[in-house]
Image (spheres, rainbow, N blue to C red):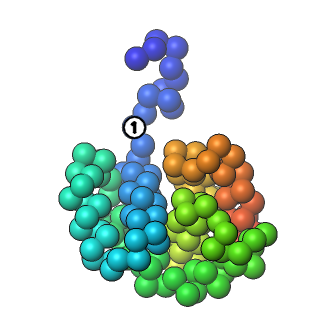
Amino acid sequence: MARNMTEQQVRKPSARRRARECATQTMYAWDVAQNSVEQVEIAFLTDNAEETKGADLPYFRRLFRQTVMQIEAVDNALIPALDRQLAELDPIERAVLRLATYELLFERDVPYKVVINEAIEVAKAFGAEDSHKYINGVLDKIAATR
């Protein structure tokens, strides 16, 4: 590890961030494969045991499952903030936006700034080069209506 790295760069992601990252991967798999929530979750947990270490697994499960259960409300809140059709979004962007929109709508104990920042960081980790900028703009619009 380089000596010049700041403490922030060295720090491991929080348990909630890891939960959001895992939920993003699982949401992506659910969206693409169209398998049941249970099948996708079990497959992810089985195939990615190493990746789930350090994750808040109860929060991961709640975030993934509740987003799917509330998908109609999530999509209805998300669609007006988009500049294109939901189906035209990159699947990773769609997963990040759906999970963050769920959090904005239903996880009232999580401040909206935290939800947006976490979504940006997850998009930086998994999305296209500048997808975090798009996600920031969309979530700002949704947060303003909350």
Quadrant in which the C terminus appears: bottom right
Q: Amino acid at mark 1?
A: Lys
The answer to whether residue 92 is seen in the rendering is yes
Residue 83, given in percent of the width and then of the height, sits at 78, 69
Q: Is residue 105 above or below residue 96?
A: below
Q: Specify the quadrant of the image occupied by residue 73.
A: bottom right
Q: Horizontal and vertical percent for residue 140?
A: 73, 64
Residue 50 drawn above or below residue 102: above
Up/down of 91 relative to 72, above or below = above
Q: In the figure, is residue 144 to the left or right of 107?
A: right
Residue 26 horizontal/vertical position (percent): 39, 64
Residue highlighted by disc 1: 12
65 on left or right of 48:
right
Q: Nearer the viewer, residue 101 or 143?
A: 101
Is any atom of residue 53 visible in this view?
A: no
Q: How many marks?
A: 1
SS at circle 1? loop
